[in-house]
């Protein structure tokens, strides 16, 4: 059986090139493609590819958010983030979204094919250099950010669960509180931290390196959005 792949990139010529590259191997089949995040988030769980390749910046949002949404529905679908931007923020968000790999668009064709095969086999491709960059950034952030001190113990627990990729419903089940109550807590957390999205909160939580063990667990598991 071939490895099945879905492509998300807003440039048709890039999708065409990726399709030709992957399908020329003989053991990889592209079963769908899209140029919009919302369309991909809907179609990928229905098609159930082995690997979904996500571009980061899209006209209607982020491929990283699409990755998180897809994996919250079906965690067996493995995500590979393919981007032109080698920055720590995108890498952090990709990791927190549950992506199995983060590669730049200047990767050689053979390298991309190898990455798809390895991810399909269940490997994580966040390499040691990328890990070192993230850890340095996280430690700097942990030492310099006083905002976390404003959170109540319950808000800190919820922030930890956001960082673990849990949805509001899953957080409510873990903490035995109503989903609406969780939503209110999340709104309060974002307000206190001066953030706009759960993704930003998840990355901030990962930088804490707190005593609940996130620093030692790598890569984090993301199962919600």
Image: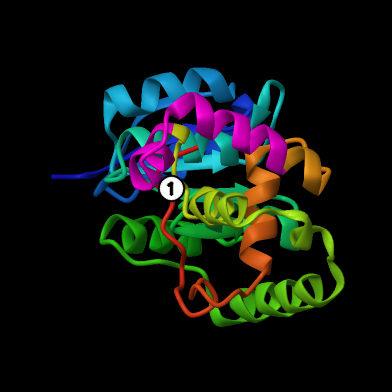
Q: Quadrant of residue 63?
A: top right
Position of residue 190 measured from the top left corner of the image (x, y, whole percent): 73, 40
- Residue under the image location 40 percent in, 32 percent down: 169
Q: Is residue 128 magenta?
A: no
Q: Can residue 192 be seen here?
A: yes
Q: Can residue 106 be seen here?
A: no
- Residue under the image location 29 percent in, 22 percent down: 46
Q: Which residues are magenta?
A: 169-189
Q: Which residue is mark 1?
A: 79
**Nearer to me, 49 or 145:** 145
Count the marks: how many? 1
- Residue under the image location 78 percent in, 56 percent down: 150
Please tell me how crowded label 1 is: few (under 14), some (14-19), or many (20+) other residues with Cα within 10 Å. many
Question: Residue 191 vs residue 14: left or right?
Answer: right
- Residue under the image location 46 percent in, 72 percent down: 218
Q: Is residue 184 magenta?
A: yes
Position of residue 171 measured from the top left corner of the image (x, y, whole percent): 43, 42
Position of residue 179 measured from the top left corner of the image (x, y, whole percent): 44, 28
Helix, strand or loop status at disc 1: strand
Q: Main secondary structure of the magenta part?
A: helix
Q: What is the quadrant of the N terminus in the image?
A: top left
Q: Is residue 65 above or below residue 113?
A: above
Q: How is the image coloured?
A: rainbow
Q: Is residue 33 above or below residue 198?
A: above
Residue positioned most to the left: 1
Position of residue 104 measured from the top left corner of the image (x, y, whole percent): 64, 57
Q: Is residue 125 above or below residue 178?
A: below
């Amino acid at each position: 059986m071939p490895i099945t792949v879905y492509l998300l990139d807003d440039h048709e010529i890039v999708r065409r090139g990726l399709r030709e590259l992957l399908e020329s191997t003989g053991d990889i089949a592209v079963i769908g493609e899209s140029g919009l995040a919302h369309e991909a988030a809907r179609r990928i769980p229905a098609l159930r590819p082995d690997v979904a390749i996500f571009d980061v910046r899209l006209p209607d949002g982020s491929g990283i958010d699409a990755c998180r949404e897809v994996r919250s529905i079906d965690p067996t679908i493995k995500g590979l983030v393919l981007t032109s931007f080698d920055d720590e923020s995108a890498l952090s968000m990709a990791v927190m979204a549950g992506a199995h790999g983060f590669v730049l668009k200047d990767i050689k064709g053979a390298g991309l094919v190898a990455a798809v095969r390895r991810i399909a086999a269940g490997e994580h491709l966040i390499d040691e250099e990328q890990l070192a960059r993230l850890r340095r950034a996280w430690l700097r952030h942990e030492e310099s950010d006083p905002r976390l001190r404003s959170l109540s113990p319950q808000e800190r627990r919820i922030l930890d669960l956001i960082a673990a990729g849990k949805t509001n419903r899953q957080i409510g089940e873990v903490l035995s509180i109503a989903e609406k109550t969780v939503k209110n807590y999340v709104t309060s957390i974002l307000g206190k931290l001066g953030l706009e999205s759960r993704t930003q909160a998840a990355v901030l939580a990962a930088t804490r390196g707190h005593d609940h063990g996130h620093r030692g667990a790598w890569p984090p598991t993301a199962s919600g959005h």
